[in-house]
Image (cartoon, rainbow, N blue to C red):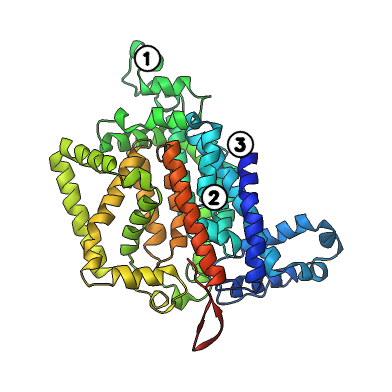
Amino acid sequence: MGKLAVAAAVAAWAVPVAVLVNSVVPDPFMDEIFHVPQAQRYCRGEFLVWDPMITTPPGLYYISLAYLASLFPGAWAIKVAEAFDPLCTTALLRSTNVMMAMVCGVLVHDLLLCIKPEIGKRKATAYAILVAVYPVHWFFTFLYYTDVASLAAVLAMYLFCLKKWFWVSAMFGAISILFRQTNIIWMLFFAANGAITYVQDLPLSDYVSHKNSRLTDKSSTEVLDSDNTALGLRRRRTNGSISQRRIDSGSTNLYISFIEEVLDISFKLWNSKSKVLLNFTPFAIVLVVFVAFIIWNGGIVLGAKEAHVVSPHFAQFLYFGLVSAAALLPLHFTPRRVSELFRGCAKNKTSSSLAMVVALGLSFVAIHFFSIAHPYLLADNRHYTFYIWRKVIQTHWMMKYILIPIYVYSWFSVINILGKSQTRVWVLSFVFAVALVIVPAPLVEFRYYTIPLVIVVLNSPVIGNCRLLALGSAYTAADLFTLLMFLFKPFHWEHETGTQRFIW
């Protein structure tokens, strides 16, 4: 069991399903009508021709060229413009994402062993396969969209940041932005927390000078040698697992308050600023180039800017909380989990009650004033979100308010789960990153939730085998349902020619 098993498992279902999809739907569909012709222009060497309806950078087309070149090296040797054009069929371009799905599975496997090595290779393999069959990610494995390749680049960035290969991580950060611009937020998230972990793992002498240290030689020795002291654990485990070092140096139990945690991190960052700047300069370079691009482009999206205007869609933040909790149903929606959360709140009634009231109040404001119904959401009945909006959220004017407690519970549960293995700074920065990524998006798309959802999965407690099997079965059932609906339940619009299909 291992990464080869993950790649083989993904290929075992992805290849035949891809063949089936291409036989039933051979022509570009939905956003593919923009991506496929643009990729074919690149195959002809027309790199300066751009479709103004495409909003994302050309990373997907570059990776497709590299992929096709690896499949047909002879065509590359002859002449790209003449030899590649016939090869850039819709089916072959779609197969790019099949390969990227295999890469995603392997990266999830390695990330799990990196974050929680106690999980073991067998369980990491099962988890990687579970992520591979997550319905939204699985569905877009077979279409020529940017999502799967974008996830692969972000996961690679995450993995190399954890391994402290910061220059490589920054390179994948730059690559991830070529797939989707909002990945700049995940790069900053990984870089910031990578910097914190980096200074946490430095020896005590690296960030406490003899001049301003209040520790005596005796107390310093005790701090470094004590079996029960976090810094001592950190010192001894410098060559240990990444995940164990983070837990030992960053568990919330090691800090009396959030303020002390922030002050401790700030102190260490400041006293190790030269090393931090040296190691994390690549991320700063990518950020500067990205800002320059936004200034030059006049905005973050490349094309169709009128349909992708940045909006204060705070309700989107609540939707993600529910989707992420529902995707890990055995962790969040069980009687035991509900009682556990309520018992935790009962231990500190004042702060918990205040947090609950504030969360409910802010959620009400978000739903009432910042719930955006994009024209595409209201008019495009090919998406499942169209039916969720009409049949659930808009079924009655009270329904959107009735769902508020569920949104709040979902977020409380997700934050509580993440807080068991990560520092409060990490959890807060993750919540902030999620908001920055999805709140500005006016259109409700489950695809936008995939990257933060996978990060939640990677940093959540391990699910037992029975529950893991049940969750995987539920994912598989959803996969089969959406595939059958897409392939064998086509429909037609009266106002437009062509066959329409159901899609996430």
Separation of disc 2 and disc 1 at Cα? 43 Å
Amino acid of disc 1? Ser
Residue 218 visible in the current orientation:
yes
Question: Which label sits on residue 301?
Answer: none
Residue at the spot 38% in from the left edge and 42% down from the top edge = 426
Whole-percent x, y for residue 79 in the image: 84, 66
Amino acid of disc 2? Ala
Q: Nearer the viewer, residue 368 or 137?
A: 137
Separation of disc 1 and disc 3 at Cα? 37 Å
The numbered mark, 2 or 1, whose residue comes first in the sequence reads: 2
Whole-percent x, y for residue 474 in the image: 45, 52
**Left or right side of 111 for 335:** left
Question: Which label sits on residue 2?
Answer: 3
Q: Residue furthest top?
A: 218
Residue at the spot 35% in from the left edge and 37% down from the top edge = 423
Question: Which label sits on residue 132?
Answer: 2
User: Looking at the image, do the residues carrying marks 2 and 3 touch, with CB atoms under 8 Å apart?
Assistant: no
Instruction: Choose top left, top right, bottom left or bottom right for residue 381.
Output: bottom left
Residue 183 visible in the current orientation:
no
Amino acid of disc 3? Gly
**Residue that carries the numbered disc 1 in the rendered image:** 226
Whole-percent x, y for residue 354 in the image: 15, 47
Q: Nearer the viewer, residue 335 or 37?
A: 335
Disc 3 residue crowd, few under 14, some 14–19, many 20+, Cα 10 Å? some
Whole-percent x, y for residue 398 in the image: 20, 69
> Please, what secondary structure does the residue beneath circle 2 have?
helix
